Image (tube, rainbow, N blue to C red):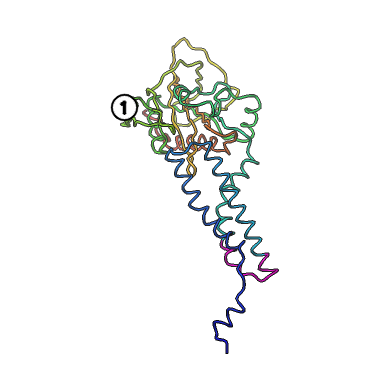
Amino acid sequence: MATIDERLARVERPRSNAGVWCKRLSFFAIPYFVIVVLAHRTGNIDTIPVFWMLGVGVLILVAALALGARGFLDLWNNGHEAGLNSAQGMFVAILLLLPFLYFGGKSLILPPLYDISSDLEDAPQYDTVLELRTESMNAIGGPTDQARDLQLRAYPKISARRYPLGEARVFKAVVELIGDKDWTILTTNTEQGKAPIDDEGSGLVAKPTSDSNGLPLRLTLPNYRPAKRIQITPSADTFESQQISPVGRQDVESEDAQQERYVEAVASSLLFGFESDVVIRLIEEEEGTLVDMRSNSRFGPHDLGANASIIIDFMSELDTTLQGLGEGT
């Protein structure tokens, strides 16, 4: 007479290989993406290879979904054991695909821009960062007429600011805010980064940094360049930051030699660590300080709205930081 184990063996359902591999691939993708992201953020992998590696990861997840669907089909048609493996694998695959679906949706909705500026007529110019950018990176130039129209329609909130405060006070707030965001300020090549960033008492010290290729980032701060224009309209009686349109500015001639002060920094995205070069321009006027900002992605024809978010968030936080400091400053 057959034992219980023998009877169970007779009715044991065959296992679906598709369901098994669905779970294996989706769970394999977890450490795969973690390794790729960490390797890029630590500078062990350059950005362009990361794009390809992320694409391979997406293909792995799509394959896992296809195998999961086949596993459920085997379960439905042949009664194969596949339901649990397929469900677990497809759940993990969909979860990992959500960020890519989100960014893919943004690429369809937002315009293909990678260089955003609060001044579309006379954008703030980069200096030392040009020496660090390679031919494979996005070009830095003036916006085309098409790019201007796309930015104005997609990001109407982007604008410069004018504060009824001295340039030194605004500069200090700008540098401190950059530090709070953990952006990399392009600094001097002084030994061990001992050089102070500015002379107005911010208390910040330049830190030695390097780019993804290990090249030193060198820039003397503060950096001064001749100004091309001056605009004077605000009243300093009360503190109120004035938003300045990116286009349609009027130049004002002045006999006084004015200076533009620049701060350059590198901002990294939160998840993947993709870098954007940021330049902030401060122009001291008779009754305040004008602040312009520009952000340019190093790689990719589409920034997925990242540079616009960098500028909008920074300007909003700068407004908050300087609010109420107009009187007596």
Foreground of the two, 190 or 212: 212
Quarter of the rendering occupied by the C terminus: top left
Q: What residue appears at the point 53 percent right and 38 percent down from the top-left corner?
A: 49
Q: Can residue 84 be found in the magenta stretch?
A: yes
**Of helix, strand and loop, which one carries label 1?**
loop
Task: In the displayed orientation, state which residue is furthest to the top.
Answer: 255
Q: Residue at x 52, y 54 (%)?
A: 28
* Position of residue 145 measured from the top left corner of the image (x, y, whole percent): 65, 24
Residue that protrudes farthest toward the bottom in the picture: 1
**Badge 1 local density, few (<14 within 10 Å), some, or many (20+)?**
many
Q: Is residue 257 above or below residue 202?
A: above
Q: As drawn, which residue projects farthest toward the right?
A: 77
Q: Position of residue 293 (x, y in %)?
A: 50, 28
Amino acid under disc 1: Pro
Among the 4 quarters of the image, the one containing residue 262: top left
Q: Quadrant of the N terminus?
A: bottom right
Magenta-colored span: 73-88
Vertical arrangement, residue 281 with respect to residue 273, above or below: above
Residue that carries the numbered disc 1 in the rendered image: 196
Q: Is residue 254 left or right of residue 58?
A: left
- Farthest residue in the front direction? 1
Q: Position of residue 292 (x, y in %)?
A: 50, 27
On whether residue 208 falls in the magenta region, the answer is no
Magenta stretch, overall SS: helix
For the residue pair 329 and 17, the one nearer the viewer reads as 17
Of the pair 228 and 17, the residue shown nearer to us: 17
Rendering coords of residue 46 (x, y %): 48, 36
